Image: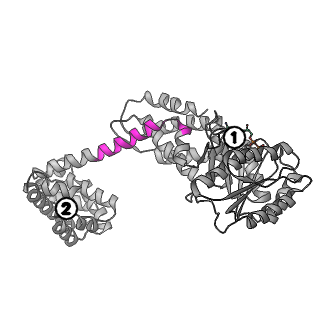
Amino acid sequence: MFENLSDRLGGVFDRLTKQGALTEDDVTAAMREVRTALLEADVSLPVARSFVKSVTGKATGASVTKSVTPGQQVVKIVHDELIKVLQGEDAPEALRIDNPPAPILMVGLQGSGKTTTTAKLAKRLKDREKKRVLMASLDTNRPAAMEQLAILGTQIGVDTLPIVKGESAVQIAKRAKQQASLGGYDVYMLDTAGRLHIDQVLMDEVQAVRDVANPRETLLVVDGLTGQDAVNVATEFDEKVGVSGVVLTRMDGDGRGGAALSMRAVTGKPIRFVGLGEKMDALEGFDAQRIAGRILGMGDIVSLVEKAQEVLEVEQAERMMKRFQKGLFNMNDLRNQLEQMQKMGGMGSIMQMMPGMAKMAKQAEEAGMDDSAVRRQIALINSMTKKERANPALLQASRKKRIAAGAGLDVSELNRLLKMQRQMGDTMKKLGKMGKGGMLKQAMR
Ligand code: GDP
């Protein structure tokens, strides 16, 4: 099960003490474990496969920050990918329940938790959105189910449509619609009959009800514990009646969310809510982050890695500041800056935003710093030896020619780069002298 995923990953990576970038072998070994764990959690094979492929691409070559282990780093990458898959392309939208009375059709197999969920959702709409809700049970085969909804309604203070013996599901739906209009309700919820398995009679009935009610939302309730089956049920219901969203129940149980992952990936339907118990307030809006955390069961590691990354960035910036204050600014520093700029998208715009940097921005502009120029300049710096990078004053004319040729560029371009490095160094020095850190520190923030 998913519970073991963290242990499995830990096992693979604990043996590796080496820091640095994740190698392909590291990642492949870890992904074998991820794949097995996903399959054991009843995630469908194609979904597990494409998930692993996508994570592999992201993890290979990813750098590992100093204060976390490679295993922890992979967990973070897996976690982020889980969120992406669970979330889907579009952000979760709110239920479309404007234009009262808005019909919500509740569908699903018997025992999935449909009636319970209908009541939970009605309570939520009443409490949180101050909606007046009317619930109606359409389960003409099971009087007990109709009774159950009425009892839940009384319990949560939501009206239910009075039960009239002998009516068909369609007749009840019509009456609910009428009653909702007359009674000034914002929303009416139709709790359709369930069967143990999908059959034609059930689908015909749900279709007929759908055509009468013309629901704004058709929510499919599925048991999250049934994993793969839940996904098959969803696919069938969607084909036959059209589903606008899914509610996964029993997510408080041992199934760690495998169904959630496949559901989104296979059906493309958004998971709207998750049921987390039998109580009437045990219904949560779907939160990909929370489910991913539950699947992995390792929120601590994720925040640890996030924090470590932040610390590392701050440490790097502080180290650089110290150098600048001492008037040290060699080609390594310049390359560092250039790379940062590249990452942040364009040089001039960033410098213009920083106090005291306008002059440098101008210098940069003069030096022709568009994005392709930045790439060329980094190439030039990379062609230098370690010594030359640390102390560019060492560069003689012959070496300059070689370096420029090595990068496929003209010597004049290298000379411009050298000039820029000197000028930037001077500017840094001046800024550094304006009180320890004062202006530069501000500028770096
Ligand atoms: P229906 O036949 O689909 O209408 O299912 P019910 O609403 O009658 O629910 C069947 C059983 O599942 C009931 O005992 C519910 O209390 C229980 N149930 C429903 N949702 C959840 C849930 O999210 N978690 C847990 N643990 N039990 C649930």
Give the residue at x 53% y 44%: 290
Location of mark 2 (residue): 401
- Contact (CB < 8 A) between labels 1 and 2? no
Residue 159 in the image: x percent, y percent?
72, 54
Residue topped by disc 1: 227
Residue 362: where, in percent of width, then height? 19, 71
Q: Is residue 185 above or below residue 60?
A: below
Which quarter of the image is occupied by the C terminus?
Answer: bottom left
Magenta residues, as a range? 294-313
The residue furthest right is 166
Residue kind at label 1, given as amino acid type: Gly
Q: Amino acid at mark 2?
A: Lys
Left or right of 94 in this view: 101 = right
Residue at image point 30% right, 43% down: 311
Q: Quadrant of residue 136?
A: bottom right
Residue 355: image x %, image y %? 18, 64
In this rendering, position of residue 433 left or right of residue 23: left
Kindly report the secondary structure that dominates the magenta region of the rendered protein: helix
